[in-house]
């Protein structure tokens, strides 16, 4: 099961009318789809530049007017859909731990996109899928391994760790919502696989989160706010392919919930000992 979300050029370098530089990460369209929305929510730096009613300017002169705040995010609106501005002046929002001292590279646009990407809307890639190439897919086809897809638009919350004040009770951590959609043909493929005694393998934590959200709510489309941590009983997946994650991340808690904390710790110790690569462009493991 793969996630067909596509990473959008969501990071915009903007300026105040006085000339000061600001940055905006567009996270979600508010008044329409990705291609036609004029109002977006996003993360701003510095946030003070986006007080309600203030204007910031893009490189092509496009005006963005700050609106109300939605929690940690700001909203901005423009006279025209922001999609074209993103395509012409936006950058791929690489994870915060990938630094580009000389600025973004042109190759980031393709390198940080999976083979399955079809539905634009994510601000982070479902990176477990980066391991899949045409050669790998051909080998899977030769073994009659079936594939199906869903969409979960990965948001910035995927990088938010559990705070120290929640260490005693991680259930207090609030998950950021992410929109997901599991098509009817994918639902039928899952049900048929289960009926014949097959296994459903989630490629990446995002695919797992979407399927388990469907399992718990009965909704094949909606907002995924499910927090999976040790003690959780999985309702759909029988295995997952996942990268090695950051400490204190909710992703690490999800894989610990599936495989058990002791086994995950042992796997990470082995990875460190053998020099495996961690995080977005790192190595992966198969959990069964």
Image (tube, helix red, strand yellow):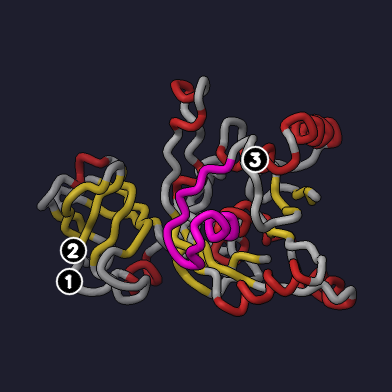
The residue wearing badge 3 is 245
* Front residue (pair 71, 197): 197
Q: Which residues are magenta?
A: 211-228
> What is the residue that sits farthest to the left in this orientation?
53
Q: Can you see residue 105?
A: no
- Residue at 18% x, 63% y is 63
Disc 3 versus disc 2: nearer the observer = 3
Quarter assignment of residue 40: bottom left
Mark positioned earlier in the residue sequence (3 or 2): 2
Badge 1 crowding class, 10 Å Cα cut-off, few under 14, some 14 to 19, many 20 or more, is few
Q: Quadrant of the N terminus?
A: bottom right
In contact (CB < 8 Å): disc 3 and disc 2 = no
Badge 2 crowding class, 10 Å Cα cut-off, few under 14, some 14 to 19, many 20 or more, is many
Left or right, 175 with respect to 213, comes to left
- Distance between mark 1 and mark 3 Cα atoms: 40 Å
> What is the residue that sits farthest to the front in this orientation?
195
Answer whether residue 226 is magenta in the image: yes
Q: Position of residue 249 (x, y in %)?
A: 57, 36
- Residue at 68% x, 69% y is 190
In contact (CB < 8 Å): disc 1 and disc 2 = yes
The residue wearing badge 2 is 63
> What is the residue that sits farthest to the right in this orientation?
143
Mark positioned earlier in the residue sequence (1 or 3): 1
Above or below for 174 versus 36: above
Q: Secondary structure at mark 1?
A: loop
Q: Position of residue 187 (x, y in %)?
A: 61, 72
Above or below for 184 versus 200: below
Badge 3 crowding class, 10 Å Cα cut-off, few under 14, some 14 to 19, many 20 or more, is some
Disc 1 versus disc 3: nearer the observer = 3
Answer whether residue 240 is magenta in the image: no
The residue wearing badge 1 is 79
């Amino acid at each position: 099961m793969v996630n067909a979300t596509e990473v959008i050029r969501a990071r915009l370098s903007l300026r105040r009318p006085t000339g000061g530089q600001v940055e905006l990460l567009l996270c979600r369209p508010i008044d329409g789809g990705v291609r036609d929305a004029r109002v977006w929510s996003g993360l701003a730096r510095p946030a003070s530049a986006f007080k309600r009613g203030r204007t910031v300017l893009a490189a092509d002169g496009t005006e963005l007017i700050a609106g109300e705040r939605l929690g940690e995010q700001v909203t901005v609106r423009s006279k025209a859909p922001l999609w074209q501005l993103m395509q012409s002046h936006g950058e791929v929002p690489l994870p915060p731990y990938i630094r580009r001292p000389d600025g973004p590279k042109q190759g980031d646009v393709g390198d940080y996109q999976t083979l399955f990407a079809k539905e634009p809307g994510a601000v982070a890639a479902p990176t477990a899928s980066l391991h899949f190439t045409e050669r790998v897919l051909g080998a899977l086809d030769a073994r009659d391994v079936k594939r199906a897809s869903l969409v979960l638009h990965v948001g910035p919350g995927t990088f938010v760790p559990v705070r120290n004040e929640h260490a005693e009770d991680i259930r207090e951590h609030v998950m950021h919502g992410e929109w997901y959609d599991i098509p009817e043909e994918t639902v039928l493929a899952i049900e048929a696989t289960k009926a014949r005694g097959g296994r459903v393998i989630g490629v990446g934590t995002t695919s797992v989160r979407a399927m388990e959200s469907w399992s718990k709510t009965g909704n094949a489309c909606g907002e995924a706010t499910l927090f999976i941590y040790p003690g959780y009983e999985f309702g759909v997946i029988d295995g997952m392919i996942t990268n090695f994650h950051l400490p204190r991340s909710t992703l690490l808690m999800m894989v610990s919930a599936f495989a058990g904390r002791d086994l995950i710790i042992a796997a990470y110790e082995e990875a460190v000992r053998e020099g495996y690569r961690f995080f977005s462009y790192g190595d992966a493991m198969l959990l069964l």
